[in-house]
Amino acid sequence: MIIGTTAIILLWVVFSLPLWANILLTVVAGFWILFCLLFTVYYFNLDMKLLSGLQKIMFKIHDKKKEKNRHI
């Protein structure tokens, strides 16, 4: 994220483009960075790996709780 922001700022400084071109370039670069980030998460299945780790933690927390008697 920091690299992307730095690249956008460098493009603004190095190339003296009109304001509309800078805004368009920033929007396109932002979408491209977001796409690359989401594709990386999808390709390496990082969301399921994260949830798998969280599931182990949640099971430990749940198993430590005392079971409550809930009669209906």
Image (tube, helix red, strand yellow):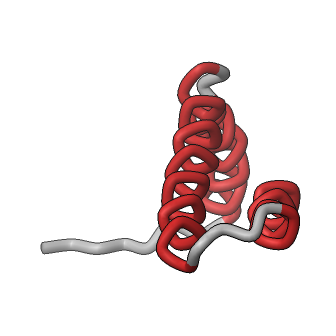
Q: Nearer the viewer, residue 41 or 16?
A: 16
User: Where 52 falls versus 25 (above or below)?
Assistant: above
Name the outermost residue toward the bottom: 19
Instruction: Identify the residue at horizontal 21%, vertical 72% (top origin).
Output: 71
**Residue 7 shown left or right of residue 60 in the figure:** right
Quadrant (top left/top right/bottom left/bottom right) for the N terminus = bottom right
Name the outermost residue toward the top: 43
Instruction: Identify the residue at horizontal 59%, vertical 69% (top origin).
Output: 22
Q: How many labels does the image show?
A: 0
Q: Which of 49 and 2 is in front in this view?
A: 2
User: Where 61 falls versus 16 (above or below)?
Assistant: above
Location of residue 15 in the rendering, given as x and y in whole percent from the top left corner? 78, 62
**Residue 14 shown left or right of residue 29 in the figure:** right
Location of residue 25 in the rendering, given as x and y in whole percent from the top left corner? 57, 59
Instruction: Identify the residue at horizontal 56%, vertical 50% (top origin).
Output: 34
Name the outermost residue toward the left: 72
Q: Nearer the viewer, residue 26 or 63?
A: 26
**Residue 9 shown left or right of residue 24 in the figure:** right
**Residue 71 shown left or right of residue 23 in the figure:** left
Quadrant (top left/top right/bottom left/bottom right) for the C terminus = bottom left
Q: Quadrant of residue 45?
A: top right
Location of residue 43 in the rendering, given as x and y in whole percent from the top left corner? 60, 20
Location of residue 54 in the rendering, given as x and y in whole percent from the top left corner? 66, 49
